Amino acid sequence: MSPVLVFGVISGYFLLLILISYLTSRKSDSMTFYTGNRESPWFLVAFGMVGASLSGVTFISVPGEVGNTNWNYLQLVMGNMVGYAVIALVLIPLFYKLNLISIYEYLKSRFGSRSYVSGATIFLISQTIGASFRLFLAATVLQLAFFESFGVPFYGSVFATMVLIWLYTFKSGIKTIVWTDTLQTTFLLAAVVISILVIAGHLNKGGWELLELISKNEKSTIWVWDGNSGQNFFKMFAAGIFITIAMNGLDQNVMQKNLTCRNKAEAQKNVFWFSLSFFFSNLLFLALGVLLYYYASVNGLVLPTATDELFPSLALNEFGTLAGIVFLLGITAAAFSSADSALTALTTSFCIDIINLPEKKHINQDRTRLLIHIGFTFLVFFTIVVFNELNDRSVVSAVFKAAGFTYGPLLGLFVFGLTNRTTIKDRFVPFVCVLSPIMSFILDQNSAKWFDGYQFGFEILLVNGTFTYLGLWMLAKK
């Protein structure tokens, strides 16, 4: 694709985001950044959250992963649906009842200040690494497709990207994010649908023929019953439940959007409708994966070594200009829908949980929040640059996986708090929150050797949360 055309597409996209930011930032006050003044229409939040939840990792990786594990991923998504029901029926009522801005304020009222700061710190570390990793993958694609043609180094393109994200989020924060997420979800899903239609055109297949091709393809196999496999149904289903609860229900990035709805009932309605949209969106990605591999097979194309490169390679080089444009819009939307909300959530958590900014009436709150927002923008930028300097995707993936272990303590803290009334020795909680992920990581690395070939999949999160729960029980006050 022509670099000039790519530049026009990306420039037009960002102009739309800036326009939305301008329109939503009028009549903003100091709380708009954190809560959107609790005026967001539930259906807007539900639709916008689809793009933020899928992210650039899903957009690139899920279609390519079909080549390795077929549709096994759908087993995890089925568990996700149950997890979202728990969020809607248990966590949403709790957070609205307590009128929280940051969900980690619950830990302070339930356990004490050390538990509160521990939970917020875990989120800040995990979200910084997670957002940086997701944006790193997308930035790599944009670098190859556009910036490299103009001789712009990788750090230059990432810096420009972070500045643009800051420009449309610094004023109204989560209020702007709710609206930009809607735009970005539209582009993301349109990219998948148009890609499927383009492939159908190349294959001369109609709608029913396409459905038959996908349903009968061996790569559409869903179920795995082998107990030692990391893709086993029961492992993935259970993991899907607890991953959703931990990484959505206990994640400020996601819950901050739910808490912008007008009331508890609308927030619950938002979660249920979002979960349905999320399920069918993943079906689209998996169907696209089957078609990508089928197309490559019938045309005798050499598959890329890395499965993550399959969709970008075919979209930019094989399917024509329209498919290339919608792919770039899709990957850009996927990357920014997760990165912009992550920056807003990081700023919110730091302001509320770490320095308690709203209570400090003697200082300029808008200016302080602005400086913190700038600080996190640079922190994510430098983290991405470090990822690039490592120059080893497997190392970066390992760092991202390690960050995922930190959600276990959050799961353990909230489950312990919600399932009993036991008080604990709050000052020792930080030690439990550090030891639980370390023990889980050691167990994960040695499970095949210690347990006769058994390999942990995503269910290691549940083990991690259990370690935390037991550790908190040991800290119970007599």
Image (spheres, rainbow, N blue to C red):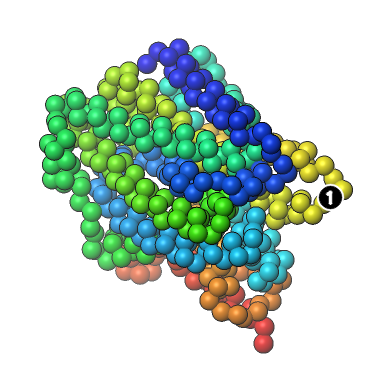
Residue that protrudes farthest toward the bottom in the picture: 478
Q: Label 1 sits on what residue type?
A: Lys
Judge whether residue 117 can be spotted in this image: yes
Judge whether residue 300 can be spotted in this image: no
Residue at position x 66%, y 44% in the image: 32
* Number of marks in the rendered image: 1
User: Who is closer to the viewer here, 274 or 335?
Assistant: 274
Residue at position x 27%, y 22% in the image: 318
Residue 468 placement (x, y as % from top left): 55, 70
Q: Say whether residue 291 is left or right of residue 123.
A: left
Report the quarter where the N terminus lies: top left
The local secondary structure at tag 1 comes to: loop
User: Who is closer to the viewer here, 345 or 397?
Assistant: 345
Residue 87 placement (x, y as % from top left): 47, 61
Figure check: 46 above or below 64 = below
User: Who is closer to the viewer here, 88 or 221?
Assistant: 88
The residue that mark 1 highlights is: 361
Q: Say whether residue 277 is left or right of residue 464.
A: left
Residue at position x 43%, y 59% in the image: 84
Figure check: 148 above or below 116 = above
Figure check: 405 above or below 395 = below
Pointer 1: residues within 10 angstroms few (<14), some, or many (20+)?
A: few
